[in-house]
Image: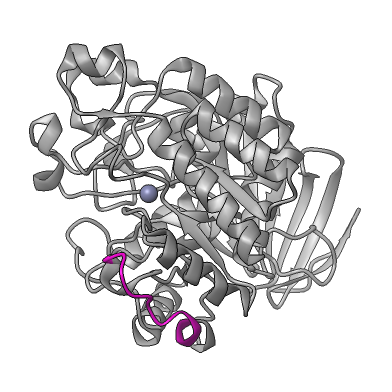
Amino acid sequence: MSDLLITGARLLGGEAKDVLVLGGTIAEVGSGLDAPEGAQRIDADGLGLLPGFVDLHTHLREPGREDAETIATGAAAAAAGGFTAVLAMANTSPVTDTAEAAERVLDLGREAGLVDVQPVGAVTKGLAGEELAELALMHRSRARVSVFSDDGRCVHDARVMRRALEYVRAFGGVVSQHSQDPDLAGSSACCHEGELSGRLGLPGWPAVAESSIIARDAQLARHTGSRVHVAHVSTAEGVEVVRWAKAQGIDLTAEVTPHHLLLTQDLLSGYDPTFKVNPPLRPSEDVEALRAALADGTIDAVATDHAPHARHDKEHAFVDAAFGMLGLETAFAVVHDTMVRSGALDLATLAERMSAAPARIAGLTEHGGAIEAGAAGNLVLVDTAASQTVDAAASKSLSRNNPWHGMSFTGAVHTTILRGRVTASLQGAS
Ligand SMILES: [Zn+2]
């Protein structure tokens, strides 16, 4: 059932090849290949073939908020977006801060069977920022947790962050930090601090609240000889610190979201909570800096920060509404449109940023590798010429907080393949 022959696909956007997947593993890459009887065939003439995308930053809401998303609906949205693996953030209810909780997320992902759901473990118990969670036990569990994050909150206490980095170093883990100094940008901060936040009367979220934490964590990573990952970097100042840290040889990686690559703070002037996200949308100068950093590799990866919310949590006055927006299904289209069509990235480098680098950071060896014999058949076919207009009602997600509704993009996911099995097929996309 997981035998598949893809014919005429442009590998990483280059030469057209056939790819034969047998028993979930790539058996052969070549020309004029034959499929065994019973194998599925996909005529991929004109389509690009990339390793399946890997999302370092997904909120799936289960357990606890199944009214906003379940692991099954989030996995369906991920597959529709071309993903073959997602990292499920720990800020569920209960929090993923034990081995049992992590194994439960893993098992629910396997039941859904559409994408590999890899749990992220909390850094601190209950995300309270005080006492370290069971980091080593989560790593030794069946879930093999190696990415830890209190995302939604910053690990603010430098002593706790230092100890977390020391712990994860022992097994090659990484701490993914939500860089927001709560003394500089508190929990109500929801608009980039500047002229606009003053005019709109919204609590400001200054760039220095991000960059100062990135700088501190870089120093702690150097001091401990451990590895830190910067979640959703959103400012030019933050990028500058990431660039500096890498130049020092510090083991630091960074991700950017599709929304920070395209949307700007100007969208807040209508007080529409759909555009309320944390960190907030920034001025266009920051967007330009983020694009340049993704192009030159200062930012390693794209991550969606897919954050579904039920209507009753989002439909409030701007200051009271929940933070976050959907992102899984539109990530490729946004990155393709902003980065590839503009000439800043080619398709092969997009695959590096959306597949290979995130898989490496998360230690997922079955994803993001070269498309060659022996590799797992985790793949995505993309149609770079297809145009699509986003319809929030058509989303696989349970939630509708979709900032992309009504926007048109060139570039669409055509078919997603998990170990040789088609998990999403959007052939009506063109
Ligand atoms: Zn976050």
Is residue 367 in the magenta section? no
**Residue 39 found in image quarter:** bottom right
Q: Main secondary structure of the magenta part?
A: loop
Q: Magenta stretch? A: 128-138
Residue 299 falls in image quadrant: top right
Q: Is residue 133 magenta?
A: yes
Judge whether residue 430 can be spotted in this image.
no
Q: Position of residue 331 (x, y in %)?
A: 49, 40
- x and y percentages locating residue 192 in the rendered image: 32, 25
In percent of width and height, residue 211 lies at 48, 37
Q: Position of residue 201 (x, y in %)?
A: 14, 19
Q: Is residue 131 above or below residue 7?
A: below
For residue 96, say whether it is visible.
yes
Identify which residue, 40 or 388, lies in the foreground. 388
Q: Residue at x 38, y 37 (%)?
A: 209
The answer to whether 345 appears left or right of 238 in the picture is right
Residue at the image position 21 percent from the left and 64 percent from the top: 66
Residue at 36% from the left image edge and 30% from the top image edge: 404
Viewer-proximal residue among 290 and 143: 290
Of the 4 image quadrants, the one containing the N terminus is: bottom right
Vertically, is 402 above or below 143?
Answer: above
Quadrant for the C terminus in the image: top right
Number of numbered discs visible in the structure rendering: 0
